[in-house]
Amino acid sequence: MWIKICGVTRTEDVATVVHSGADAIGFNFFPDSKRFVSIPTARALAETARRCAVDVPLADLVGVFVNAAADAVRNVVQDVGLNVIQVHGDETVEHVAEIHQLCPHIPIIRAFRVDPGDTERTISDIDRLSAVVPLAAILLDAFVPGEFGGTGATVDLSILEGCALQQRPPLILAGGLTLKNVALVAGCSTVWGIDAASGIESSPGIKDSARVYEFVNAARAATSHSGCWIRNVRIGKPPSNI
């Protein structure tokens, strides 16, 4: 299982995530987010991740973007040395396709905010985009009006059945994941990865070291018990110039 700790803002938290055995670190480049990091800060955090990855593989360095111009995304990828892009806003199919065109060798995760009353539309949107852009994964987050993740709201798990009905990109689940529910989610056969932010924090952007370790260990234990334990999964290759 691919485990991402998102919204990291401090070097000490980067070290915690790397040493916990998580597979990915998320840097939020949405200016209105409580977990926003500037390009210089993200560059320093990414360098810390590389220095910490001595005895373990380097975690995926994921840039989270919300309605950012395609050329701006490319510039951040190059400046910071990211190796995965997460598109988390209201971007159209054409917008995501443009990002892929400018960053053809960088895997793209497309996030979808799931409205419990309209899951069929979400599945339709997934299929329309997947037909145009070779997505590395899709991420399902809870729909909260005016918000783009990190709310602590949970996803209605009934959508997992719909996503599993036919071949689609690997599924990452986000939204309100904590120590209390991670085992249930990680044990779902349709879930390829999980993404946590608020559920392992002491305050927005400030990770709780003990919670991070416990969260990762609980997810690993759940997938081990379900017979599908995979450690050190990676989406992206080591960062390089586009």
Image (cartoon, helix red, strand yellow):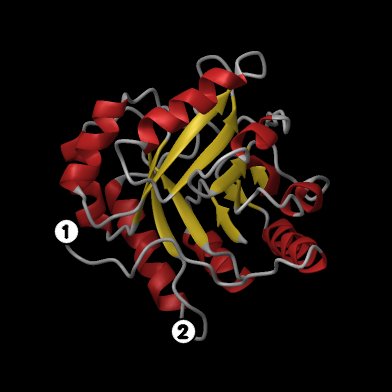
Rendered position, 238 above or below 117: below
**Label 1, label 2: how many angstroms apart (C-alpha)?**
25 Å
The residue singled out by tag 1 in the image is 242
Q: Amino acid at mark 1?
A: Ile
Q: Is residue 52 visible from the viewing direction of this image?
A: yes
Q: Measured from the top left, where is residue 28 in percent x and y?
A: 42, 42
Which residue does the image show at 24% across and 48% down from the upper left?
76
Q: Is residue 31 visible from the viewing direction of this image?
A: no
Which circle marks residue 16 in the picture? none
Which residue does the image show at 48% across and 46% down from the upper left?
169
Q: For this view, does 241 lie left or right of residue 158?
A: left
Q: For this view, does 63 lie left or right of residue 206?
A: left
The residue singled out by tag 2 in the image is 54
Question: Where's the C terminus, which quadrant?
Answer: bottom left
Q: Amino acid at mark 2?
A: Val
Q: Measured from the top left, where is residue 212 in percent x and y?
A: 68, 59
